Image (cartoon, rainbow, N blue to C red):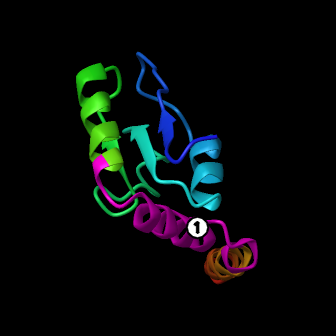
Amino acid sequence: SSDVYVDTYYSQTGGGGIGVAVMEARACGMPVVAAARPGVELGVSEGHNGYLYKTGDSRELAEKILLIADGDVRRFGLKSREIAECLGDWERNMEDFEKKYEMLSSNIRGQP
């Protein structure tokens, strides 16, 4: 059991994907301290619902964990949950996808 999700992902190439575990932590209403990388940065707002640290920087990671511990963990967790609900809303995401698909396909059909 934990009050904060700490993501210690490390990659020398800097990749990483969408961070499914980070999304799950947000969905559980947990504040997040995560390595800054594409995908994860989308749902972690610095000082709002968590903190990002430079991958491989253990000193910065420790500082960010202490910021969460000294802050309002409950408020951060509620904000995390709100972001997860927004980003993970399957129905809304599919509606957006369908609109974009229709727009693209109509542009292709309209060309000679």
Residue at figure coordinates x 68%, y 80% from the top left: 92
Q: Residue 43 placed where, x, y %? A: 47, 58
Left or right of 23? Residue 56 is left
Q: Residues within 10 Å of mark 1 (few under 14, many from 20)?
A: some
Magenta stretch? 70-93
Q: Residue 108 placed where, x, y %? A: 65, 74
Task: Return the residue nearer the eye: 76 or 101.
Answer: 76
Residue at figure coordinates x 24%, y 30% from the top left: 60
Task: Return the residue nearer the eye: 73 or 61.
Answer: 73
Q: Which residue is mark 1?
A: 87
The answer to whether 51 is drawn above or below residue 49 in the figure is: above
The answer to whether 9 is drawn above or below residue 76 in the figure is: above
The answer to whether 17 is drawn above or below residue 41 in the figure is: above
Magenta stretch: dominant secondary structure: helix
The quarter holding residue 63 reads top left
Whether residue 50 appears in this view of the structure is yes
Q: Residue 32 placed where, x, y %? A: 46, 48
| Residue 46 belongs to the span the image colors magenta | no
